[in-house]
Image (cartoon, rainbow, N blue to C red):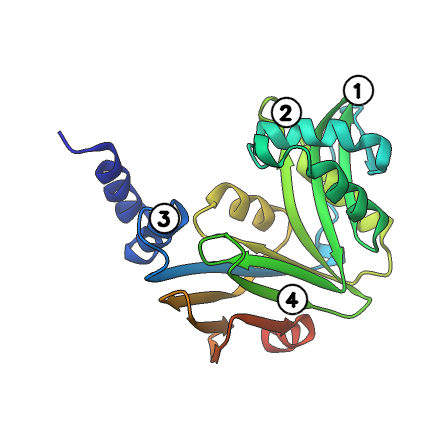
Amino acid sequence: MLPTVLKEAVSVYKKHGFGMLLLEVFRNRRWPVSLFAYARQEILLAHSDKLLPKRLLDNGYEVKAAGESDINAIIELMREDRWVSEDQYQQQPNKLRGFVKSRNSLYIVYDKQLVVGMLYLYRREREIRLSDFSGENGLFLTGEDDIAFFGYGYVALKYRMKGIFPLLVDHVVRSNPSIKMYVSDVSPLNMISLNSVRRIGFSVVGNVMLFRVFAILSFWRVCINNRIFYRFGKNIHLAADSLISHSE
């Protein structure tokens, strides 16, 4: 019988092709990333009026911008997603406290005393760590005051398919009338999230690929609506205005 790792590789290859197989290998560190690393992120755009759902479920949940008093409940939801490891648990409250006090916002959904969904919203700049996700390389998306960036979002397993995500997005858009354009980024391997943001109104306008050799040389390929350009360097900065102009 095929080893489990090989079975998973064959499954990913059949479903997504060779490029996604490479991404899966590097994401799970099944290759010495100090020799070569590859990462990819899809870039999506949506006008604010396209994100307002035509119908919302009347489920009685409370949606709000998070404050310091919500931090412990938020961390419990993060732990369900295994986004916060046990060794990071002590650091997370301070990080969240700093985030909710910044110009950015974290929107959450309560079912009674339980936080069951959340969505990060970034203003002016969104930093995305690529490569082997150890912080070696960064993609920085920047925008003006009328552009915002969706970040990490999560809905508790038991509350999925109950209209939580559209409820969050609707609240975000109505709470920020000055925002005219939203930008999102999703790994092409995360088909659930990719399909979710497409359903609510986002459209893929391109992607960013990173190739890193010997943990020293970093090479970027950016494709926006079939317009391709290349950059060398540890980090790359993309202005959201240029993404919008190239996509129109």
Residue at 37% across, 47% down: 29
The x, y position of residue 243, in whole percent, is 62, 72
Q: Closer to the N terminus: mark 1 or mark 2?
A: 1
State which quarter of the image contains the C terminus: bottom right
* Mark 1–mark 2 distance (CA, rounded to whole Å): 14 Å
Choose mark 2 or mark 4, whichever is in front. 4
Give the mark, 4 or 3, whose residue is nearer the N terminus.
Answer: 3
Q: How far apart are marks 1 and 3 (CA)?
A: 37 Å
Q: Nearer the viewer, residue 165 or 2?
A: 2
Horizontal side of 205 relative to 118 (left or right) equals left
The residue at which mark 2 appears reads as: 159
User: What is the number of the mark on residue 141?
Assistant: 4
Residue type at the position of mark 3: Glu
> Residue 142: where, in percent of width, then height?
70, 68
- Give me the C-alpha separation between circle 3 and circle 2: 27 Å
- Where is mark 1, residue-wise? 113
In terms of secondary structure, where does tag 3 sit? helix
Q: In this view, does 80 lie to the left or right of 123?
A: left
Q: Which of marks 3 and 2 is nearer the N terminus?
A: 3
Circle 1: residue type? Gln
Residues at marks 4 and 3, CA–CA distance in whole angstroms: 24 Å
Q: Residues within 10 Å of mark 2 (few under 14, many from 20)?
A: few
Residue 143 located left or right of residue 214: right
Q: Which amino acid does label 2 sit on?
A: Tyr
The residue carrying mark 3 is 24
